[in-house]
Image (tube, rainbow, N blue to C red):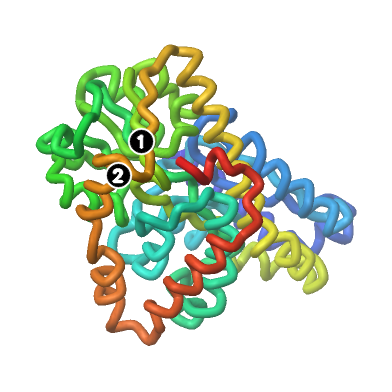
Amino acid sequence: MLKRNALATALATLTLTGSLSAYADEPIVMHVATAGPPGHVQNSVVFPTWGKWIEEATEGRVKMKLEYGLGDQSSYFTLVEDGVADAAWSFHGYVPGRFRLTQMVELPNAGVNAEAASAAYWDVYQQYFADANEHAGVELMGLFTHGPGQIFSSEPVESLADLKGQKIRLGGGIQKEIGERLEVTAVGAPGPKVYEMMQQGIVDGVFMPTASEKDFRLAEVAPHLTLMPGGLYMGSFAIVASEDFLDQLTPEDRQAILDVSGARLSTLAGRAWDQSDENGLAEAEKYNVSIKRVSADSPLAREFTELTAGLDQEWIDSVSDLDVNAEAALKAFRQAAQSYPVTNSATAAR
């Protein structure tokens, strides 16, 4: 708490003195709350690249600094709203009830990789959902997905019935709906906790992208990996910034940052996650994880298609109280994602 209050005070001071520091040729520091280890793709690729873009676009007047240990990701939207951090990234599913439209990209059977999904996500969200103002209180800088969510388990999965009654870590969002259809015992926890949970036998498995083999060291504690074609789902994330932080900048610098965010940042995050998935598979092979690659015409894949039938319509119905055309948005998203020029066919085919 003291660390959080101290950072909040420091950031408040920056806000008050921002204009003065600009005249003194001192750069304004953008404090970004982040989670996961330093080697996580967000911390090793996405934010350093975005920070470089920002620094170049503002001619050095704004620089980025990553802040670890400010809390778990479920609090990150609030941290930015309260001015404790200038920016952050978080999984929408960690805040149940607040984000419903974002579940569009999590629905199964899209059959694309994270880059294709993320590029389409930003464009379709701006076209169909921006006026719904789901991210009120923060400035939306990017939207992206992780790679297809797969099955990490302590025992082999020959049929979806093998998962029934198993304790499975779920991250929220559409994962929760899929977990209910699979009749698993859902256990909620943030990503950084999954290693400990698998190691101690608290859970029998987790649903996550293959990047987690390396990012969260699951290759060491989950002996089985089942790769479903297209995955079980995709996870929806946002990168957000503090409106107060952006307001302290000159109009030119504010616009410069926005210009290197949005679609460009979203696509970067998706592409980086695809590469991280490839790194995760290599890690699994290094630790001799038993990898089951499920073909699209296999009984297991057909079983999953049958299990998730009607899920699209359930989501469309769930947001019917909002003034949006969810059905048209979902159709536009899938068309855009599936027609995106794929840069990594191996990742997309999972």
Percent across and percent down for residue 343 are: 66, 47
Q: Is residue 261 left or right of residue 233?
A: right
Name above or below for residue 327 compared with residue 68.
Answer: below
- The part of the image, by quadrant, that contains residue 217 is top left
Name above or below for residue 99 compared with residue 281.
Answer: below
Circle 2 residue: 301
Q: Could you tell me the amino acid type at mark 1?
A: Val
Q: Could you tell me the amino acid type at mark 2?
A: Ala
Name above or below for residue 131 compared with residue 80.
Answer: below
Percent across and percent down for residue 283 are: 51, 20
Residue drawn at point x = 38 percent, y = 55 percent: 109
Q: CA distance from mark 2 to mark 1?
A: 7 Å
Q: Disc 2 on helix, strand or loop? A: helix
Quadrant including the N terminus: top left
Percent across and percent down for residue 281 are: 50, 26
Residue 131 shows in the view: yes
Q: Which mark is residue 345?
A: none
Quadrant including the C terminus: top left
Q: Are marks 2 and 1 in contact (CB under 8 Å)?
A: yes
Q: Disc 1 on helix, strand or loop? A: loop
Percent across and percent down for residue 271 are: 62, 46
Circle 1 residue: 294
Q: Earlier in the sequence, mark 2 or mark 1?
A: 1
